[in-house]
Amino acid sequence: MENERAWRVSIEQIKAGNYNLDLKNPHNPDSGPGDVDHLLPEYEKLLGQIAETRGALKAQLLEALTR
């Protein structure tokens, strides 16, 4: 059964690739690294969330250690 995670490959394709079975998913084409103007704000947002989570964890650990 073929779906977005499983697909058939012909023996000719396998031979042409020197029997390398590391084949790209044809249902999920590689769209490249993405747009920097979109990715940079997302990255900065994630860094902020990480800092907030780290701060909350540190506060909880300090509270637990001082009890």
Image (cartoon, rainbow, N blue to C red):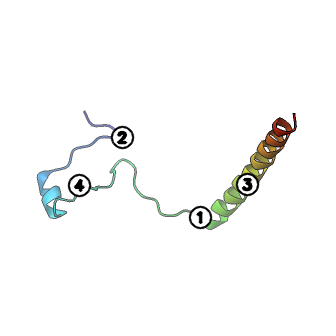
56 with respect to 35 (left or right): right
Closer to the chain start, of discs 2 and 4, is: 2
Q: Are marks 3 and 4 in contact (CB under 8 Å)?
A: no
Residue where numbered disc 1 is placed: 35
Which of the two discs, 2 and 4, sits closer to the camera?
A: 4
What is the secondary structure assignment of the residue under circle 1?
loop
Q: Are marks 1 and 3 in contact (CB under 8 Å)?
A: no
Decide which of 8, 67 is in the foreground and name it. Answer: 67
What is the secondary structure assignment of the residue under circle 4?
loop
Residue where numbered disc 3 is placed: 45
Determine the CA span between mark 1 and mark 4. Answer: 30 Å
1 with respect to 11 (left or right): right
Which of the two discs, 1 and 4, sits closer to the camera?
A: 4
Determine the CA span between mark 3 and mark 4. Answer: 37 Å
Which of the two discs, 1 and 3, sits closer to the camera?
A: 3
Q: Residue drawn at (59%, 64%), measured in percent from left and top?
A: 35
What is the secondary structure assignment of the residue under circle 3?
helix
Tell me the kind of residue under disc 2: Glu
Q: Are marks 1 and 4 in contact (CB under 8 Å)?
A: no
